[in-house]
């Protein structure tokens, strides 16, 4: 994503503003990305016997670890670790709006007798 922002800016599609990049990893992986970030290291260390219920966060050694850490630092972002219990808790639901996707105007709900194909007209 970080590289894509630079490419889109070069094409004139966006300006130079960038979001903060945030890395979220399983708590047991503190010897990996979070630790490398906190210690100012350029690369992560391999996490032996990686174990977490969050299989998508179980990455013993990311392929582009140095690129990830560089993007986080350049964006003034951060790296955080969450425990398995916290990962199971539902996140608060709230709408997210960005400048590029303003909220749509609400349209009236259909009555049960109305044809759904008329909803977009």
Image: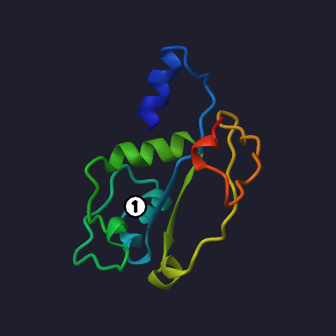
Image coloring type: rainbow
Name of the residue lying farthest toward the left:
49
Residue 92 vertical position relative to residue 10 in the rendered view, above or below: below
Q: Is residue 54 left or right of residue 15?
A: left
The spot of residue 56 in percent (x, y) is 34, 65
Crowding near the residue tagged with mark 1, few <14, some 14–19, many ≥20 C-alpha atoms within 10 Å: many
Task: Identify the residue shown where x is 34% and y is 79%.
Answer: 52
Q: Between residues 11 and 46, which one lies in front from this camera angle? A: 11
Residue 4 vertical position relative to residue 65 in the rendered view, above or below: above
Name of the residue lying farthest toward the front:
113
Q: Which residue is mark 1?
A: 33
Q: Between residues 104 and 101, which one lies in front from this camera angle? A: 104
| Numbered marks: total | 1
| Quarter occupied by the C terminus | top right
Task: Identify the residue shown where x is 72% and y is 41%.
Answer: 104
Q: Between residues 61 and 58, which one lies in front from this camera angle? A: 58
Residue 53 vertical position relative to residue 57 in the rendered view, above or below: below
The spot of residue 54 in percent (x, y) is 37, 74
Classify mark 1: helix, strand or loop: helix
The spot of residue 84 in percent (x, y) is 44, 82
| Quarter occupied by the N terminus | top left
Q: Is residue 92 left or right of residue 4?
A: right
Task: Identify the residue shown where x is 77% and y is 49%.
Answer: 108
Q: Quadrant of residue 4?
A: top left
Name of the residue lying farthest toward the bottom:
85
Task: Identify the residue shown where x is 40% and y is 54%.
Answer: 41
The spot of residue 59 in percent (x, y) is 29, 64
């Amino acid at each position: 994503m970080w590289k894509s922002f630079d490419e889109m800016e070069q094409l004139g599609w966006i300006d130079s503003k960038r979001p903060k990049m945030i890395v979220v990893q399983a708590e047991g992986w503190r010897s990996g990305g979070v630790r490398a970030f906190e210690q100012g290291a350029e690369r992560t260390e391999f996490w032996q016997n990686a174990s977490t219920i969050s299989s998508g966060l179980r990455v013993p050694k990311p392929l582009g670890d140095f690129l990830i850490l560089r993007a986080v630092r350049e964006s003034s972002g951060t790296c955080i670790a969450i425990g398995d219990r916290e990962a199971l808790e539902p996140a608060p639901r709230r709408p997210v709006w960005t400048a590029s996707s303003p909220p749509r105007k609400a349209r009236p709900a259909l009555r049960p007798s109305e044809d759904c194909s008329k909803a977009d007209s």
